[in-house]
Image (cartoon, grey):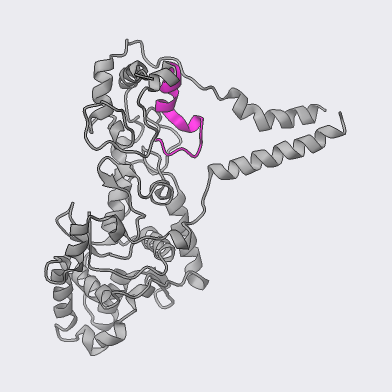
Amino acid sequence: MARMATCVFLLFGRLVWASDSLPPLAQVAGSPQQGERIFVEREAGHCVLCHQVQGLDAPFQGNLGPDLTGVGSRLSAAQIRLRVVDASRLNPDTIMPPYYRSAGLEQVATDYRGQTVLSAEQIEHLVAWLATLEQSGG
Amino acid sequence: MRRRLPALLLVVASAALADTRSFVDQSDLPAEAVRSGSVFLTAETRALQADGFANPGYLWVERGGELFNDGDKVCSSCHQADALAGAAARYPQYDAVAGALLNLEARINLCRQHHQELPPLAYESDELLALTAYVANLSQGRPLTVAVDGDAAPFFEQGRAYYFQRRGQLNLACNQCHDDNWGGKLRGDTISQGQPNAWPAYRLEWQTFGSLHRRIRDCDVGVRAEPHESGSEIYISLELYLAWRARGLAVESPGIRR
């Protein structure tokens, strides 16, 4: 029986421990204005490469990732944070790159080795902006 | 309860295993889904590729034709151009003498060394691009049909593994864009299937002609991975996987790509 319990734990342990959310990474109050710039700018997050947000001032928004219009109504800041930091913790097969992870990656270019795509502060700004996106109209 | 638990566990375990497999989906692009990159071009760019006078790639084809017939011991003293029609569609190919997988560029360079006593041309040099373009163009319209069995098998597996391996700071594998999301939009760009049948090609972004390996390096750099050298065994192996994946697609070189 103990062995079976172990089996059950091994099968479900990963799921049990996998949380759906993540607390803040840095002791900064996220700035939605800076977050919006990070979302759009090529040199920062460039999230518009794959995601859309209706009403956002950015031409040619991509469609590989989910439409993030009103995402703040669907997910909490902590849930959004986890998905930006490393969405593979929820779905190992995800196409979403990890924006705050530097370990367990293969063949990383020398210039980027040991670094995360965004800084903890940038993630907080981004999360703060995304959390403000409310579903309007209904 | 004690009796039922093992059966229950078996069901749970098989479900969990099936789940695990879906997380590492490495199924090849189905043959019926295969589309040439020209499908994802604008009508204007497609027309430019089809126009033998306007397509700048033909400058390299013509130069290649000159090189093919130029020098003391010329390519054409062994090869009749007609006899080379269709050859490029069968590359990369394992060569028993070299004990290596060769793509067109590597084959041309081996020919130079062994039969013309000439030094190999640098990868991405205009001369090697030109000769490659000339030989590839002799197979224009022929369907890609590479051998992936026998001695080629380990290279094929190596190339296939590279295709499905996540890499770089962005942690992306080739298949995540080119199998799972072709047709999707990266800002204004439509993601193609990453098919190799138009290469070497004139790339608008480069404003020049280039090799498939240079294009692959751009993909690796794009996911912030350290790229391999053009002409490296790993890239030729990947080229073999790509050619097999594109089986049946007609050679278009010199193509025009974004």
Q: Is residue A6 left or right of residue B178?
A: right
Q: Tell me if I can see residue B120 in this picture.
A: no
Residue B214: quarter of image: bottom left
In the displayed structure, would residue A126 be above or below residue B174?
A: above
Q: Verify whether residue B96 appears in magenta.
A: no
Image quadrant holding the N terminus of chain B, namely top right
Numbered marks: total = 0
Quadrant in the picture for residue B50: bottom left
Image: magenta residue range: A78-96
Q: Residue furthest front?
A: A137
Q: Nearer the viewer, residue A134 or A126?
A: A134
Decide: is B114 above or below A112.
Answer: below
**Depth check, front residue: B45 or A80:** B45
Magenta stretch: dominant SS? helix
Image coords of residue B3 (percent x, y): 87, 34
The residue at 26%/88% (across/down) is: B80
Q: In the rendered structure, does residue A89 fall within the stretch colored magenta?
A: yes
B41 vs B89, left or right, is left
Name which residue lies at 30% across and 21% down.
Answer: A122
Q: Nearer the viewer, residue B14 or A50?
A: A50
Residue B136: in sight, yes or no? yes
Q: Nearer the viewer, residue A5 or B194?
A: B194
The location of residue A33, given as percent across then percent down, is 24, 17
Above or below, comparing residue B250 to residue A90 in the picture = below
Whole-percent x and y of residue B107? 32, 74
The residue depicted at 32 percent of the width and 23 percent of the height is A119
Q: Position of residue A74 (x, y in %)?
A: 44, 21
Taking the spot 44% from the left edge, 23% from the top edge, the residue there is: A82
Where on the picture, by quarter, is residue B121? bottom left
